[in-house]
Amino acid sequence: MAIKTYKPYTPSRRFMSNLSSENITAKPSVRKLLIKLPVSAGRNNNGRITSRHKEGGAKKLYRIIDFKRNKFNVEGKVSAIEYDPYRNCRIALVTYQDGDKRYIIQPSGLKVGDKVISAESGLDIRLGYAMKIKNIPIGTVVHNIEMYPGRGGQLARSAGASAQLMGREGKYSILRMPSGEMRYILGECMATIGVVGNEDFANISIGKAGRNRHLGVRPQTRGSAMNPVDHPHGGGEGKTGSSGHPVSPWGMPAKGYKTRRKKASDKLIISRRKK
């Protein structure tokens, strides 16, 4: 997908880039698949900020995505490719033979008019088809992968993401995750064939602070610009080097400190992601 650049008629436009929308074929038309999500702006149920530097952002509606792909053995046809403000990939509107309409994540190369189908087994390895991992050939590239059978896809859902099926051991399949991590996934879990589209999303330049505000991101003040009472990095005359390792406002090391707790799923990780 092409990246648009602009003539520098303002200072911020000089560095701004965006994705072209030539692959978007329609605006949202299925009202029942759109809902308004409440905006927390980083506050908890008491109204206190628990996640800093967040705000409401631009008004948007959430698209209900079919992550489960559990409409088995009913062929669907891609009716439209649409923009989704809640994710960095495009979504495809699929109209099934029984009239049902659902959104799915658009794999790279899926176009209007293409057929998609999901089943437990017995399908060809074609773009957008969904099957249980135990029935997908080794070496296949997949996305929208379930971690628990029936829960819906949770892994490899962002733009350009994919995982590769590397092998099988008993009831588990071995997948190489987008991070490089090797992991066991139950063979009963569903996955979709292909790579998530919109791969060039990683190459766009935001260009100006205002565009981040539209995304719901508030400004962040450097700790070194604060007073000692406000941050461990604060104080000193002029610009001073850090004394010790960089930390958060509450003293937690900010770089390289392991925060992952021991959890039950650790035994399913064969090797961690590359350092």
Image (cartoon, rainbow, N blue to C red):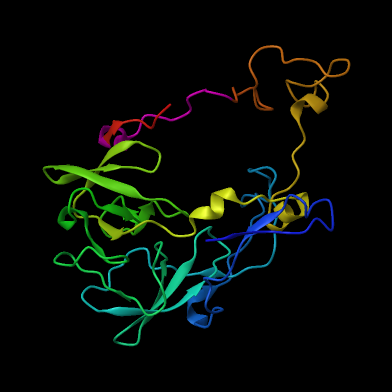
Q: Which residues are magenta?
A: 255-268
In the image shown, does 231 or 30 lie closer to the viewer? 30
| Magenta stretch prevailing secondary structure | loop
In the image shown, does 164 or 251 lie closer to the viewer? 164
Residue 237: quadrant of the picture: top right
Q: Is residue 38 above or below residue 257?
A: below
Q: Position of residue 158 (x, y in %)?
A: 46, 54
In the image shown, does 159 or 37 lie closer to the viewer? 159
Q: Position of residue 236 (x, y in %)?
A: 85, 15
Q: Is residue 202 above or below residue 122?
A: above
Q: Position of residue 220 (x, y in %)?
A: 74, 39
Task: Tell me the quadrant of the picture where the C terminus can be found.
Answer: top left
Left or right, 51 with reference to 266 = right
Left or right, 89 with reference to 208 = left
Residue 103 within the magenta-colored segment of the rendering: no
Residue 262 within the magenta-colored segment of the rendering: yes
Instruction: List the single residue furthest toward the right.
Output: 237
Instruction: List the single residue furthest toward the top.
Output: 243
Instruction: List the single residue furthest toward the front.
Output: 7
Left or right, 214 with reference to 33 = right
Which residue is painted at 31% across and 67% down in the image? 69
Q: Position of residue 38 (x, y in %)?
A: 61, 64
Q: Is residue 227 above or below residue 264?
A: above
Residue 239: quadrant of the picture: top right
Which residue is painted at 35% across and 83% down in the image? 100
Which residue is painted at 84% across and 58% down in the image? 9
Tally of marks: 0
Which residue is painted at 74% across and 21% down in the image? 233
Left or right, 101 with reference to 126 = right
